[in-house]
C-alpha cells in the first residue's frame, strides 16, 4: 500500500503567514502598473469606484486574503509531490491556476456585465495573470524554504 502524504499544518501556517504581505504588495504593484498604462481608460470610469470604503476594509481584505492563501497553500501541500521538481515551474503552475480560477472569470464578468471599458477589463486580466504568476512563485519559494528549514531541524 502506498504511503499517504501527511498534511503538516505547521508548514502550511508558516507559509501562509509569511506570504500574506508580499502577496498583497505584488497584487497592488501590478494593479498600479495596469492603471498607469491604461490611465486614459481609467479616467473614463472615475465614477465606477467612487463609493468610499469603510475603515475596516483593509482588515477585512487581509482576513479574506489570509483564508485564500491558506486554502491555496493547503492544496499545494497536498499535490506538490506530483508537480515538477523545480520551484519556479511549480510557482508558474500555481499562478496560472490562480488566474484561471479567480482573475479570468472576474475579468470576463466585469468586461461583459458592467460599463467598464474593454481596455480596462483586458488590462486587469493581464495584470492579474502576471501578478498571479509572481505570487505563485512566491508561494512555491516560501513553501520550499519552510519545508527545507523543517528538514534541517529533523
Image (cartoon, helix red, strand yellow):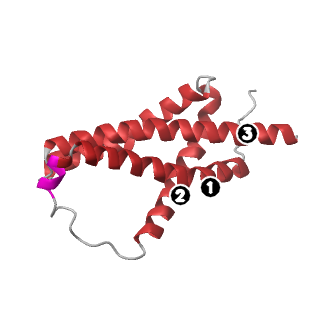
* CB-based contact (under 8 Å), mark 2 and mark 1: yes
Label 3 and label 2: CA atoms lie apart by: 20 Å
Q: Dot 3 corresponds to which residue?
A: 147
Q: Is residue 148 left or right of residue 77?
A: right
Q: Is residue 94 left or right of residue 38?
A: right
Label 2 and label 1: CA atoms lie apart by: 7 Å
Q: Position of residue 129 (x, y in %)?
A: 37, 37
- In what element is the residue under mark 3? helix
Observer able to see residue 148 = yes
Q: Dot 2 corresponds to which residue?
A: 66
Q: Position of residue 33 (x, y in %)?
A: 33, 44
- The answer to whether 87 is drawn above or below residue 19 in the figure is above
Q: Dot 1 corresponds to which residue?
A: 17
**What residue range appears in magenta?**
40-45
- In what element is the residue under mark 2? helix
- 10 Å neighbourhood of mark 1: few (<14), some, or many (≥20)? few
Observer able to see residue 70 = no
Amino acid at each position: 500500500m502506498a504511503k499517504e502524504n501527511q498534511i503538516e499544518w505547521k508548514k502550511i501556517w508558516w507559509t501562509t503567514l509569511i506570504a500574506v504581505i508580499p502577496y498583497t504588495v505584488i497584487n497592488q504593484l501590478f494593479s498600479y502598473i495596469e492603471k498607469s498604462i491604461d490611465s486614459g481608460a481609467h479616467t473614463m470610469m472615475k465614477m465606477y469606484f467612487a463609493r468610499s470604503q469603510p475603515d475596516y476594509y483593509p482588515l477585512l481584505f487581509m482576513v479574506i486574503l489570509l483564508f485564500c492563501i491558506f486554502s491555496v497553500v493547503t492544496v499545494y501541500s497536498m499535490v506538490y509531490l506530483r508537480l515538477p521538481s523545480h520551484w519556479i515551474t511549480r510557482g508558474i503552475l500555481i499562478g496560472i491556476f490562480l488566474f484561471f480560477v479567480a482573475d479570468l472569470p472576474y475579468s470576463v464578468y466585469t468586461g461583459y456585465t458592467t460599463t467598464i471599458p474593454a481596455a480596462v477589463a483586458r488590462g486587469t486580466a493581464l495584470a492579474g495573470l502576471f501578478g498571479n504568476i509572481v505570487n505563485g512563485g512566491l508561494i512555491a519559494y516560501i513553501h520550499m524554504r519552510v519545508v527545507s528549514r523543517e528538514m534541517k531541524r529533523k
